[in-house]
Amino acid sequence: MNILTVSQLNRYISYKLKEDQKLRGIFLKGEISNFKNAGHLYFTIKDNDSLIKAVMFKSNAQNLKFIPENGQSVIAMGSVSVFERDGVYQLYVSDMIPEGQGKLQADFEKLKKELEQEGLFDQAHKKPLPEYPKTIGVVTSDKGAALQDIINILSRRYPVGELRVYPSLVQGEDAPASLCRSLSIADCDDCDVIIIGRGGGASEDLAAFNDRQLAYYIYHLNTPVISAVGHETDFTIADFTADFRAPTPSAAAELAAPDINDILKMTDAYQSRLNSSFEILTGKLEKKASELSERLHKVSPEMMLMKNISELELMTRRLEFSFRRILERKESELSEKIVRLENLNPLEVLKRGYSVVYNNEKEIVMNISQIKKGDCVRIDFTDGSAYASVTDTELK
């Protein structure tokens, strides 16, 4: 026999309820009673025959667009689970609307859930917006205030871009098909970005933008799409499917294109940086050119010629100096030799009172053995010669 504790039983029932997908994300219609606002909302939802406790946590309650009160008929969206401490099941409400809006909202939530499961809202499929679009397409009513807001914003903010308007119905039974046709034309017209939207209105007025076929068209477009439907608090299927969602048509225009003043400021900053970089680069190139010019000047033929001329002049001066030194030395040596020769010159000897005697063979008589008695001799003096006959010889 399996004996359970109360906690185990409540926990098991809670687990079984959480596992039942039919009890998750349900829509429940009924009348509010026993309403209590303690930050979290505690109340009962009842009909003529039954009731269920409900709780809505503060994080969800702060998003309500109305103030709940006792006796009010509502449609609550949430999941059923067990409050284990008390052992009672209750509805955990994530959103709630008055019953008058219930059918439209229920259809919206149902379609949103289906399309989300099909992947139409996946971020991986979102296309980036062009940074500087040349052509901006607008799919909206050509008579609405939304178009005028977009024109005013873009003419002031981005006058360099081309605005193309693709008129469409934005309300009524034929509006979804009209929106699809205009989107298809804009996508084939080489637009860089497309804005689809309209001004604010009641939920019924925005119903055209909650169309399944329109969602498929937006998803399969090649051009990035910005959805701008109604006011900031309004959400449509087009908003979730588009690549970007803008809270208003004016905000969509600001999102689609940059501000020309920001571009000019950025251009000025780039120009300033470019000028600064150009000056730095020019300075470096001038310095490099100067260095190369100096190096080229050093190896230029003119410089080499001047260098060779300078070296030649130096060598010439050194050669002249050496030649003078050699010449002076040779002159000195020559002078010395001349003096020595003069000292050895017989004429000089004769000038000192000596004479030279020649025998018959015209040889200089160096000793007495070269002549004998009876020889004729010639005697040379400095100023002339005399001829004599040897009368006798005598040895010393």
Image: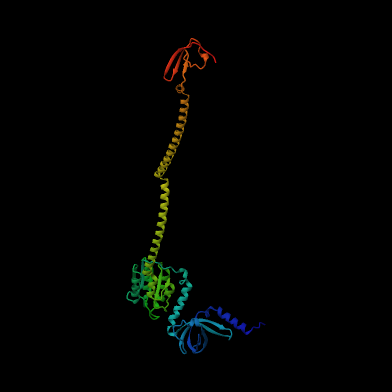
Question: In the rendered image, which quarter is residue 204 located in?
Answer: bottom left
Question: In the rendered image, which quarter is residue 100 located in?
Answer: bottom left
The quarter in which the N terminus is drawn is: bottom right
The extreme top residue here reads 374
Up-down: is 287 above or below 166? above
Horizontally, residue 166 falls left or right of residue 118, namely left
User: x and y percent of residue 328 in the render?
Assistant: 45, 34
Q: Residue at x 60, y 81 (%)?
A: 11
Colour scheme in use: rainbow
Question: In the rendered image, which quarter is residue 229 located in?
Answer: bottom left
User: x and y percent of residue 81 in the render?
Assistant: 55, 82
**Is residue 27 shown to the viewer in this render?**
no
Horizontally, residue 37 falls left or right of residue 85, namely left
User: x and y percent of residue 19 in the render?
Assistant: 56, 78
The extreme left residue here reads 143
Q: How many callouts does the rendering have?
A: 0
- Judging depth in this view, the residue of 231 and 51 nearest the camera is 231
Q: Residue at x 61, y 83 (%)?
A: 9
Up-down: is 344 above or below 295? above
The quarter in which the C terminus is drawn is: top right
- Judging depth in this view, the residue of 158 and 82 nearest the camera is 158
User: x and y percent of residue 35 in the render?
Assistant: 49, 88
**Is residue 147 shown to the viewer in this render?**
yes
Up-down: is 15 above or below 137? below
- Judging depth in this view, the residue of 366 and 336 nearest the camera is 366
